[in-house]
Image (cartoon, rainbow, N blue to C red):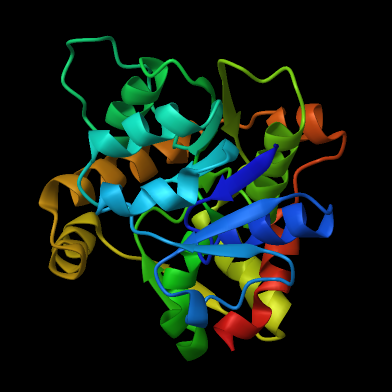
């Protein structure tokens, strides 16, 4: 039995993974909180469960060979990985661009902690490490509708990845051999500055959108009020500042695995134009 369980099955990436697996005629089971509201493709089995309540996962894991695991930012539950290891043979984990964490060293992110649990679980595993999602620019939508985006570090060059490329890589890894122990860093095909991203989105929606650099101190105050995590805000500001002089790295992971280049930010903007109108 090669049944695949997809967690986060109604989310940005998970819904695409489910659809691609179903289109390929594979045996896919979707973990959802409310099957009645999931709107899954025909032929996809819905399994009720919640990663925050590990014991609800047992029925969903029965008869499963592989698991696509997406952790939704809730407190880490070691029992989840234990249960996956009891039932499945392999896991593909949607992580982020983190460094490997040695045993005994405190984690600086939940992704590192979950990766370490998976490495020590006995499962065959693959980590997908996208640097950052192009969908994060949807946070500018209200400003774009007003015609001006005020944000810090307009010259920060980012290698944002289209969510469809992440899903394509996940499906490829789930359905082919040779990926055990791999840690795939996934990016878009080029680095595009914040200001250029705004211009490109404007082109996609058919009107001019201006960029105005927001002073760092003003950004610090606004983002801390909005996000409620001063340490995270400082980390983001520092990273964006660093990308002004040293653009975010670009990898060839998508083209190497899929035989086609990663989708451009222009492509992503066209696909999401209605989200900004």
In the image, is 174 to the left or to the right of 105?
right
In the image, is 175 to the left or to the right of 160?
right
Residue under the image location 21 percent in, 29 percent down:
108
Residue 257 image-quadrant placement: top right
Image quarter in which the N terminus is found: top right
Image quarter in which the C terminus is found: bottom right
In this view, which residue lies farthest toward the right?
259
Q: Establish if 218 lies above or below 171.
A: below
Residue under the image location 18 percent in, 64 percent down:
218
In the image, is 139 to the left or to the right of 173?
left
Residue 222 image-quadrant placement: bottom left
Q: Position of residue 251 (x, y in %)?
A: 65, 29
Q: Establish if 222 lies above or below 101.
A: below
Please tell me which residue lies in front, 220 or 135. Answer: 135
Q: Position of residue 183 (x, y in %)?
A: 55, 22
Q: Is residue 195 visible?
A: no
Residue under the image location 20 percent in, 63 percent down:
227
Q: Position of residue 224 (x, y in %)?
A: 15, 61
Please tell me which residue lies in front, 40 or 163. Answer: 40
Q: Is residue 116 visible?
A: yes
Marks counted in the figure total 0
Please tell me which residue lies in front, 117 or 160. Answer: 117
In the image, is 23 to the left or to the right of 131?
right
Residue under the image location 75 percent in, 62 percent down:
267
Q: Position of residue 145 (x, y in %)?
A: 50, 88
């Amino acid at each position: 039995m090669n049944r695949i369980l997809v967690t986060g099955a109604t989310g940005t990436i998970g819904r695409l993974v489910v659809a691609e697996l179903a289109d390929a005629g594979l045996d896919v089971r979707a973990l959802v909180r409310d099957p009645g509201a999931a709107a899954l493709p025909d032929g996809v089995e819905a399994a009720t469960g919640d990663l925050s309540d590990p014991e609800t996962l047992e029925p969903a894991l029965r008869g499963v060979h592989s698991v696509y695991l997406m952790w939704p930012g809730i407190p880490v539950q070691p029992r989840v990985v234990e249960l996956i290891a009891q039932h499945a043979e392999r896991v593909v984990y949607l992580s982020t661009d983190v460094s490997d964490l040695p045993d005994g060293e405190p984690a600086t992110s939940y992704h590192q902690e979950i990766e370490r649990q998976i490495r020590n679980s006995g499962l065959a595993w693959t980590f997908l490490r996208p640097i950052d999602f192009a969908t994060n620019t949807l946070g500018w939508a209200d400003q774009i509708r007003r015609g001006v985006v005020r944000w810090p570090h307009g010259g920060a060059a980012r290698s944002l990845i289209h969510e469809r490329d992440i899903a394509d890589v996940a499906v490829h890894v789930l359905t082919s051999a040779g990926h055990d122990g791999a840690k795939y860093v996934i990016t878009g095909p080029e680095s595009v500055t914040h200001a250029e991203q705004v211009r490109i989105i404007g082109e996609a929606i058919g009107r001019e959108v201006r960029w105005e650099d927001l002073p760092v101190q003003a950004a610090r105050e606004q983002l801390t009020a909005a996000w409620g995590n001063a340490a995270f805000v400082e980390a983001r500001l520092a990273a964006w500042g660093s990308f002004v002089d040293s653009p975010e790295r670009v990898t060839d992971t998508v083209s190497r695995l899929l035989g086609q280049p990663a989708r451009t930010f222009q492509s992503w903007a066209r696909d999401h134009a209605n989200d900004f109108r």
